[in-house]
Amino acid sequence: MITGYLSKLLPPARVVCGQILTRNLAVSSVALQKASDPIQQLFLDKAREYNQKSKASGGKLVDADDNLQRELDESLARTLRQFGGKTPEEMSKFPSFNFKDPALDPINLEQK
């Protein structure tokens, strides 16, 4: 009789324990995210520093010298020539398509 009672009790208890453990792990993972990891902190610092430099450069390359900027301009000009673009702004726009409906003849159902 006891074995029958335990066999009925164990599956629901296992489900409840599993849910409790899952919830505890979910809560503890959020708490662990706030922990200070030196590698993660270094990555965040560098990403923030790059963001500041990018805003300060006004859309140009960050920490680029004249030689690198000239090389970029030549590469963009070569791409424009290759693909038939006139300006870099034109090349960055999504193309607009104009589809016209063809003229259809009306269907005459009375003719056989």
Image: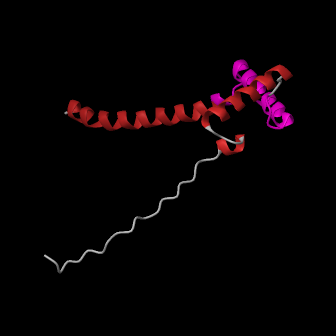
* Residue 4 located within the stretch drawn in magenta: no
Magenta stretch prevailing secondary structure = helix
Determine whether, in the image, residue 40 is placed left or right of residue 16: right
Q: Is residue 59 magenta?
A: yes
Using the image, determine if residue 57 lies above or below residue 102: above
The percent position of residue 18, horizontal first and vertical second, equals 41, 33
Horizontal arrangement in the rendering, residue 100 relative to residue 61 (left or right):
left
Image quarter of residue 91: top right
Residue at x-position 54% and y-position 34%: 26
Q: Quadrant of residue 54?
A: top right
Vertical side of 38 occupied by 83: above or below: below
Image x and y of residue 50, in percent: 79, 28
Which one is nearer the viewer's eye here, 43 or 8? 43
Q: Position of residue 72 (x, y in %)?
A: 75, 26
Left or right side of 17 for 106: left
Residue at figure coordinates x 67%, y 45% from the top left: 90
| Region of the chain picked out in magenta, as a range | 32-61
**Viewer-side residue, 85 vs 62:** 85
